[in-house]
Image: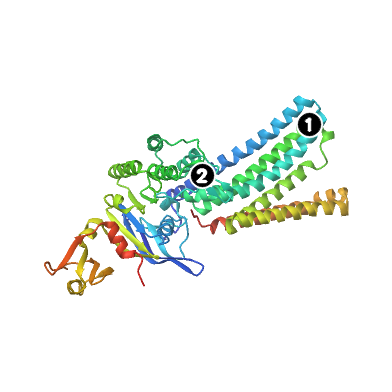
Amino acid sequence: MFCACKSGAEVEEGMKGYFRSMFYWAYCMEILFFSMLGAIVLVIFIYIFITGDMDQVFQYTITYIPMFGVIYPVSSGMNMANMQVPLALSNGSTRKETACGFLVTMHAAMLQFWIVSAVCCVIIPAEHIPDDYLEMCGLLFLAGCGIGNGLGAVILRFGNKVGWIVYMFAMFILIGGAVAVSLLLGKDTVTAILNNSPIFVAGMVFDVLMSVAYYMGIKKYEVRI
Amino acid sequence: MKEERLIGKGIIKTYGKKNVLNNVDIELEKGKIYGLIGRNGAGKTTLLSILAAQNPATGGTVTCNGMPVWENREALDHICFSREINPVTGYGANGYKVKDYLRAASVYMPNWDKELAGRLVKEFELDVKKRISKLSKGMLSMLTIIIALASKADYTFLDEPVAGLDVVMREYFYRTLLEEFAESGRTFVVSTHIIEEAAEVFEEVIIIDKGNVILKENTEELLERAVHVSGMAENVDKVTAGLKTFHEEKTGRSKGVTVLLGKGEKIPENIGVSLQQMSLQQVFVALSGKREE
């Protein structure tokens, strides 16, 4: 009976491109990740050296980690759409390989940030760690991932100018909305809402949808001079 | 046995209502150097990017050694399109360095020749730590040439590789291209506006005009059958009756036309007209130059 399945050699040949893509994207992402982490560690050490005030150090650390964990995917999503995606495609990477390479390594980097926040929970005295800190970090990282992928998709489809307009608009809505909601409902109510598992699921769905949008952006992208 | 060719059939590319490529058929054989020449906006880069599967065609197919190229890793491993590098990106100045581009190429191209890349970097005296945004036009061209030659891809496309290069470097490029061709037997497609210099390198020339491939022929054979006929208008008309003529120039009662002779066609001698062999550049201008209304 005739089998239309690919041979083992064909599958191996096809996978080579994915491995190459993943290797290169991981290389780019890890440079950025460790640069950011290095910057955080340096600032912390300088602060310790200058002030010796460990309480403040702990406070800054638990603030910076989630902050950078949001900045990283947002800037990666936009930066990679402008620079790395065209470079990968112009070097013969297929669209599937490019999308797979970027999305997998981007989420792996998010996991790394989450692991770093978990390590902080172990190292830093418990009295400095807010309740549900890990869950909050996870939610923030998911949101950052989703926003970064969404903005990257906009840039791939409509160009950098439109991407930056959407970025400014989104930041205005997010920050303004967050402040308004906090003022209206109070900090405790907001924290309780954010700690609800449906919000976490919503965050994951948002990230998945934006990842699909990013892939669609890459799929339709035209490499030009 | 797989046929070793890169074949494009019925390639159509439209951007909105604008037709950039109109039903282009093209066949690239293994082991040749092709010159792709055309005016600005003729569709050269678009054609190369579709053949290299970097951009999708609106219609038509492209196959490499019998395999479709679009999203096909096995086919794409045989193709390299080294396009013009932009010192400015959507994000502002291109902050990547030369070594970043070489590293990316070395990862993605399965047959990357690191030694050749290193040698060419030295020969071109390119500083690998320099940012792309700080490179001159000539240095950007050098980088695209290095990537193309070191890729060792069976089908290598270079888009205006000599733009910005001085005459010494252009000579070096042609020499290196021929050496690489002799050693590897790869297929090269070189698009250029500096036609005369490159004419000796091209085994076949492809002329593209307004999205159509108007000619694809062996360079030597083309130049043998391209003749410029000039003289008194009535004599020129008499001599060229029934022949394919292009690019008519009239000055008073004198006239000059370009003739592409078909098989077995000849222009009679001693009929009071002057016959001149044409250069590739002259043939190109005659076939796709600006026509007076």
Q: Nearer the viewer, mark 1 or mark 2?
A: 1
Q: Nearer the viewer, residue A223 or B133?
A: B133
Q: In this rendering, is residue A167 above or below B265?
A: above
The residue under label 2 is: A19
Q: Quadrant of the C terminus of chain B?
A: bottom left
Pointer 2 indicates a residue of which chain? A
The residue carrying pointer 1 sits among few (fewer than 14), some (14 to 19) or many (20 or more) residues within 10 Å by Cα, namely some
Q: Quadrant of the N terminus of chain B?
A: bottom left
Q: Residue pushed farthest front?
A: B252
**Seen in the image, is A150 located left or right of residue A120?**
left
Residue B222 in picture, x, y percent from top left: 24, 60
The numbered mark, 1 or 2, whose residue comes first in the sequence reads 2
**Tag 1 and tag 2, C-beta contact below 8 Å:** no
Disc assigned to residue A213: none
**Residue under the image location 67 percent in, 42 percent down:** A111
Residue at mark 1 shares a chain with residue at mark 2: yes
**Seen in the image, is B88 located left or right of residue A135?**
left
The residue under label 1 is: A57
> What amino acid is found at the position of numbered circle 2 in the picture?
Phe
Q: In this rendering, is residue A105 above or below B26?
A: above
Quarter of image, res A150:
bottom right
Pointer 1 indicates a residue of which chain? A
Q: How is the image coloured?
A: rainbow
Q: Secondary structure at mark 1?
A: helix
> What amino acid is found at the position of numbered circle 1 in the picture?
Val
Residue B6 seen in render: no
